[in-house]
């Protein structure tokens, strides 16, 4: 729940969903959702309850404004939190969505470029 001083003019309330990123040592935003009440609907003239009868009032709708999940950032959070020396452990909630071959762990298939550079540098020093 975001403090009121951090809200823009449109939002009456805002929630951010964050994930822990061990590489940077901090939480980062994945999703944001704001309850804008009728702020946006007034500007867009979106109402409900309109009727052809005289003296009937209509109301402005309340609107939510949300970002979809930042997919690449979510994948980065999973990779950073579930990485081991030999691969990525599949989080429990994702196991049923994975191919059987990768339902427990996604193995690394080649060395990281940093490790390859280290080996190349070590071999060059020995010569």
Image (cartoon, rainbow, N blue to C red):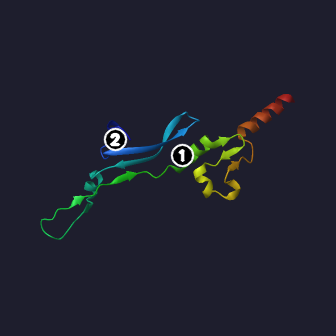
Q: Name the residue: 66% across, 58% down.
A: 99
Specify the quadrant that holds the N terminus.
Answer: top left
Residue 57 occupies which quadrant of the picture? bottom left
Q: Percent from the top left, x then y, of residue 77?
A: 56, 43
Q: Percent from the top left, x then y, of residue 22?
A: 58, 36
So how many labels did they put on this image?
2
Q: Which mark is residue 32?
A: none
Furthest residue to the front? Answer: 92
| Disc 1 target residue | 73
Real-space Cα separation, disc 1 to disc 2, in angstroms? 23 Å
Residue 8 occupies which quadrant of the picture? top left
Q: Is residue 26 above or below residue 76?
A: above
Furthest residue to the top? Answer: 125
Horizontal placement of 98 versus 70: left or right?
right
Q: Name the residue: 53% across, 39% down.
A: 20
Horizontal placement of 44 versus 22: left or right?
left
Q: Name the residue: 49% across, 51% down.
A: 69
Mark 1 closeness class: few <14, some 14–19, many ≥20 residues within 10 Å:
some
Q: Percent from the top left, x then y, of residue 45?
A: 25, 59
Furthest residue to the right? Answer: 127
Q: Secondary structure at mark 1?
A: helix
| Disc 2 target residue | 7
Horizontal placement of 13 versus 21: left or right?
left
Q: Which is more N-terminal, label 2 or label 1? A: 2
Q: Name the residue: 79% across, 35% down.
A: 119
Q: Secondary structure at mark 2?
A: loop
Q: Percent from the top left, x then y, of residue 63?
A: 32, 54
């Amino acid at each position: 729940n975001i403090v009121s001083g951090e809200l823009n003019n449109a939002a009456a309330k805002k929630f951010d969903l964050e994930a822990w990123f061990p590489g940077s040592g901090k939480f980062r935003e994945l999703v944001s959702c704001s309850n804008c009440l009728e702020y946006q609907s007034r500007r867009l003239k979106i109402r409900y309850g309109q009727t052809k009868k005289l003296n009937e009032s209509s109301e402005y709708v309340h609107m939510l404004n949300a970002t979809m999940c930042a997919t690449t950032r979510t994948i980065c959070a999973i990779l950073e939190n579930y990485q081991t020396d030999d691969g990525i452990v599949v989080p429990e909630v994702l196991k049923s969505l994975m191919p059987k071959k990768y339902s427990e762990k996604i193995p690394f298939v080649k060395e990281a470029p940093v490790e390859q550079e280290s080996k190349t540098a070590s071999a060059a020093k020995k010569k």
